[in-house]
Image (spheres, rainbow, N blue to C red):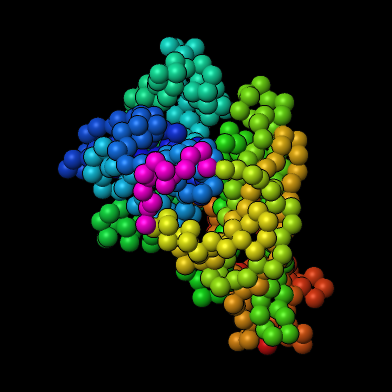
Amino acid sequence: TYLVLLQNNSELRPTGGFPGSYALITFENGSLKKVFVDDIYRADAGLKDNIVPPIPLQHITPNWGMRDAGWFADFPFSAQKIIELYQLGGGPKVDGVLTITPDVITKIFEIIGPIEMPDYGVTLDAGNFLAEIQNEVEYEADRSAPKQILSDLQPKFFERLAQQDKDHWLAIFKIISEAAEQKHILAYFENRDLEDAAVKNGLGGEIKRSAGDYLQVAFANVKGSKTDFVTENSMNLETETGADGVVGHLLKINRVHNGGDSKYGFYNRDNSAYIKVYVPKGSVLSGIRGQSITDYRSLIGHEDFGFRRDADLEAIESTIKRPFAGVDVFEESGKTVFGFWLITKPKQTKSVTLEYATPISMAEGKHGLLWQKQSGTGQDQVSFSIKLPEGKSVINQSAGLQAIGDRLVLNSDLAEDREIDILFK
């Protein structure tokens, strides 16, 4: 039995998107026996324990539930929390967690064709699937069952899949393979052999260990509606070495909100994001500008109402330091994390610039950077440049790097994780 989270990347979270709906799928002897689709808030309604949520969520919810468990960019860690909170809410024991974003379903619609939903007065296809589903859920549906359209779509969707011929199935398998590479499908298994296979085949969504430099920028939409669908991200990382050999960075994160005049109201609201920048453990933030300064406060005094604290979350939050206004620096998943808010209004462009030093050194004549993509994101544009130590010359470099003046430069995207390696003498 597997728990499947339908992660809406129009509302980004560190593991891919807010899971407004989920499915419980059961296999027996290799055959699919049952599919149950429901609103994730119904699952959380059964929670017996009141658990303190992560600090950045405390101004929108008093308690932590499965809906917000994907708070950590390391998917295996988040998946374990998802399972734990699902079972605390009365859910059955599950053997793993799978996630999928609407991008995958949209591309499959291109293969299988439109599906009529006469009870809702709409025909769903690749061009309107996401917007029409969100419109139904947000504005049209009966409030007692706002996600009913997903339950009603599920049997029609699987029936249409079953009707596909060999050529169409090859195209569908290609879509699924590319989605796994681009982190639109993730998998976690309680069985260690299966989990090892998931990680080996690029489905694990884990924060990877790196002997060299590391970067991942994870956006968490918190009460920002579906505005990530109309928000463009780009990032620029400039690297150089100081006289002591320590590697320093200037990271600029840019967001452009293109909403504001859409016929769908959920694209016209402020994009409110708590951003987590994962860097090598021991990195030191020396400056930041452009972050939003908020006065968010917890909805309740958790201690007064007997809420318990999650031990793993408390271990992370106990490391928080605040060297600058509106900035949290803490340890998570073997990395140092810089956390801050960025609120972008429709038709607005916002940028945040961070300056930080890493414990990485170029003393051995090499530099490697693993730049991991956030699960669920598209092809964010990125640029990287590095200034080599004075008097050094390159003897080998990753494809795509170009020499411009005294720097090596790469302009690319984050459709997948990017690895950059440079050897010099």
Residue drawn where x is 47% and y is 61% of the image: 318
Residue 101's x, y, as percent? 48, 40
Which residues are the magenta region?
A: 298-311
Overall secondary structure of the magenta stretch? loop
Give the answer, above or below, for where 409 lies relative to 156. Answer: below
In the image, taking residue 12 as reference, residue 86 lies left or right, namely left
Q: Does residue 101 appear in this view?
A: no
Q: Which quadrant does the C terminus fall into?
A: bottom right
Q: Nearer the viewer, residue 198 or 320?
A: 320
Q: Extreme front residue here?
A: 304
Q: Position of residue 71 (x, y in %)?
A: 47, 49
Q: Nearer the viewer, residue 171 or 321?
A: 321
| Residue 120 percent location from the top left of the image | 46, 14
Q: Is residue 19 visible?
A: yes
Residue 354: image quadrant is bottom right
Q: Magenta includes 302? A: yes
> Looking at this view, is 290 or 323 the one in front?
323
Q: Residue at x 26, y 45 (%)?
A: 94
Residue at x-position 61% and y-position 61%? 322
Residue 136, image x, y percentages: 50, 20
Residue drawn at the location 38% of the way across and 62% of the way down: 200
* Magenta stretch encompasses residue 135: no
Q: Could you tell me which quadrant the N terminus lies in?
A: top left
Q: Nearer the viewer, residue 198 or 332?
A: 332
In the image, 218: left or right of 242? left
